[in-house]
Image (tube, helix red, strand yellow):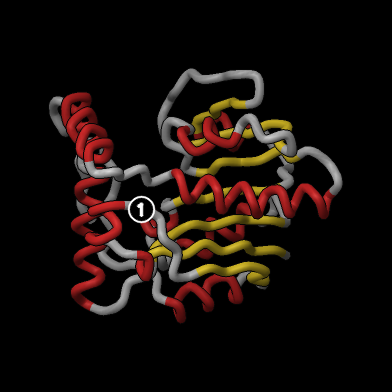
Amino acid sequence: MVRFKNANNKSILIFISDFIRKIFVGDRLKRISIQISKLLNQIHKEKKKKLIILDFGCGSMELSKRMQKKIFIKKIIGTDTFEYNFKKEKLEYLSKTKFLKKKIKFDAIIIVDVLHHIGIDKAWKILSQLSKSSDCIIVKDHFEHGFFSRHLLRFVDFYANYAYGVNIPDKYFDKNSWNKIFKKIKLKEKFHVSPFQQHDGIFNVILNKKHHFVSLLKK
């Protein structure tokens, strides 16, 4: 694992990263938000009510901000490991410490590019815990395809996360390891798309769609 807890000039590094993404059409959340919104709307129709959603490992809640105006969403609560004061009409942030003190049931949980940072060998524990809070879990994550693919993913993770103090994993899911995880905790995969095109432009050339997947797990 690689850590950047003591990175200097974080705001400058983040600005540079965001600027590069903007110049090269690197909006990483556009296609993800569209796909997840479709799945949430499907859950809304099944449950016949507006949804209360958990955005697990939400960062600054950029994904939630894009979906907050959907009519089928009642509220999105984001949680992560840091303190962050944020609350709007449909959005609320709780640090992990505060979140664990509350026992909240959710209509759906979304986990976007988080599990591989926790560690693929530990991912089943997180999913097992979260499945106690909701019967629907939407996961967006990465598949590796051999040695070169793994280190390409590590390089891109380094670029995307060096300013945030986030762990860079040693390995990523493949299809077999992913299937074993949700079966181990007796969840069923009701929807799966892979390959999934996350990026446009040069970012899609660097890390193409075979490295991404979206999955809907249910009890």
Between 208 and 80, the residue placed more toward the observer is 208
Image quarter of residue 46: bottom right
Q: Determine if residue 50 is in view.
A: yes
**87 over 154 or under it: above or below:** above
Q: Residue 170 is drawn in which quadrant?
A: bottom left
> What residue sits 23% from the left and 53% below the top?
202
**Up-down relation of residue 182 to residue 207 (above or below):** below
Residue 201, relative to residue 179: is it above or below?
above
Q: Using residue 206 as the reference point, say whether residue 214 is left or right of it.
A: right
* The one of 68 and 153 positioned closer to us in this rendering: 68
Check disc 1 and report the residue beneath it.
199
How far from the left and from the top, in percent, is residue 189?
Answer: 64, 70
Specify the amino acid type for callout 1. Answer: His
User: Residue 132 at what x, y percent from top left?
Assistant: 69, 53
Residue situated in front as seen by the camera: 119 or 56: 56
At x 74% / y 52%, what residue is drawn?
43
Residue at x 31%, y 77% (from the top left corner):
145
Residue 144 image point, x, y percent: 32, 72
Crowd rating for badge 1 (residues with CA inside 10 Å; few <14, some 14–19, many 20+): many
Residue 151 in percent (x, y) is at: 20, 66
- Say whether residue 218 is left or right of residue 174: right
